[in-house]
Image (tube, rainbow, N blue to C red):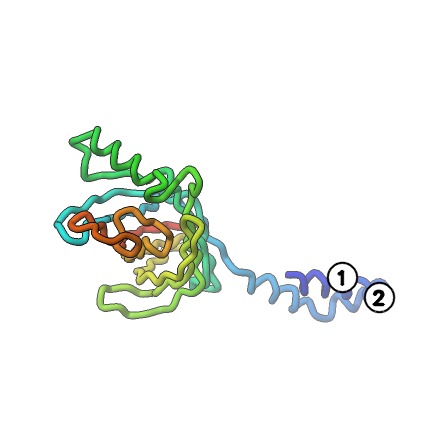
């Protein structure tokens, strides 16, 4: 865009010195510059969702829940996804498998929001920045691999997510599953990466994510 503006100014000056015919000779460069501008689709938080699952490592015990999508955008070059960002509202993290026990549900949610886990008062958001979206034909039906950086709790680590992308008019939907190693983001509670002799209290470092991201023009 800077080169377009510069060219426009130079042509304007030359037109003033040499007559208006200089502008009439070649209007194509301006048209080309406008046509190559990337398209940005805005993520729709209400239509998007992220589900999580965490479990103990030794005994069979797991919890599930959700975290809200706060904002984001998907960047397109023609029909190809070239980048984007997705921001999660970590303060919204909630549990869904303890609905019948409100006291236990509130206790778990409070613990997840505490410094033991995601410390949401200090780190209220997590962001996934898409650096590439490679077309694939996955056995799970995935059509792309989103590779980028996940930033959470002040740490950043690369993540690759296989997704199925559907385009309809001026909107796009991406669905996928990912496994994130929480130890890379200094989420230490119950992790045998940081503590010894935890016995059957060890909590797996792996957090399973089930994603649906909807973006519209």
- Mark 2 vs mark 1: give the one in front: 1
For the N terminus, which image quadrant? Answer: bottom right
Dot label at residue 19:
2
Gap in angstroms between the C-alphas marked 2 and 1: 15 Å
Instruction: Give coordinates of residue 16: x percent, y percent.
Output: 84, 62
**Front residue of 145 and 96:** 96
Left-right relation of 18 to 27: right
Residue 117 is left or right of residue 140, and the answer is: right
Q: Nearer the viewer, residue 24 or 164?
A: 164
Which residue in the rendered view is the most extreme toward the front?
A: 197
Relative vertical location of residue 80 with respect to residue 125 in this rendering, above or below: below
Residue in view at x 32 percent, y 46 percent: 49
Nearer to me, 171 or 153: 153
Residue at 12% from the left image edge and 49% from the top image edge: 60
Percent x, y of residue 48: 34, 46
Q: Position of residue 53 (x, y in %)?
A: 23, 48
Task: Report which quarter residue 84 is drawn in.
Answer: bottom left
Q: Is residue 217 visible?
A: no
Instruction: Classify residue 138 by image quadrant.
Output: bottom left
Residue shown at 37% from the left, 62% from the top: 146
Secondary structure type for disc 1 = helix
State the residue position of label 1: 9
Q: Residues within 10 Å of mark 2 (few under 14, many from 20)?
A: few
Q: Residue at x 30, y 54 (%)?
A: 194
**Image quadrant of residue 28?**
bottom right
Q: Which type of secondary structure does the marked residue at label 2 adopt?
A: loop
């Amino acid at each position: 865009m800077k080169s377009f503006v510069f060219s426009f100014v130079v042509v304007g000056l030359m037109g003033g010195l040499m007559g208006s015919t200089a502008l009439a000779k070649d209007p194509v460069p301006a048209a080309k510059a406008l046509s190559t501008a990337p398209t940005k689709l805005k993520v729709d938080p209400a239509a998007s969702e992220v589900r999580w699952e965490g479990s103990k490592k030794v005994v069979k015990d797991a919890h599930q829940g959700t975290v809200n999508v706060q904002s984001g955008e998907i960047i397109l070059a023609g029909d190809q996804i070239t980048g984007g960002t997705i921001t999660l509202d970590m303060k919204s993290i909630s549990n869904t498998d303890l609905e019948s026990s409100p006291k236990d549900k509130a206790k778990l949610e409070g613990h997840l929001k505490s410094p033991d886990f995601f410390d949401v008062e200090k780190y209220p958001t997590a962001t996934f920045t898409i650096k590439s979206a490679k077309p694939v034909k996955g056995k799970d039906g995935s059509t792309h691999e989103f590779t980028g950086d996940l930033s959470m709790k002040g740490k950043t680590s690369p993540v690759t997510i296989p997704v199925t992308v559907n385009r309809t008019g001026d909107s796009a939907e991406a669905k996928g599953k990912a496994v994130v190693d929480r130890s890379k983001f200094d989420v230490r509670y119950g992790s045998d990466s940081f503590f010894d002799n935890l016995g059957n209290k060890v909590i797996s470092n792996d957090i399973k994510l089930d994603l649906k991201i909807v973006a519209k023009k």
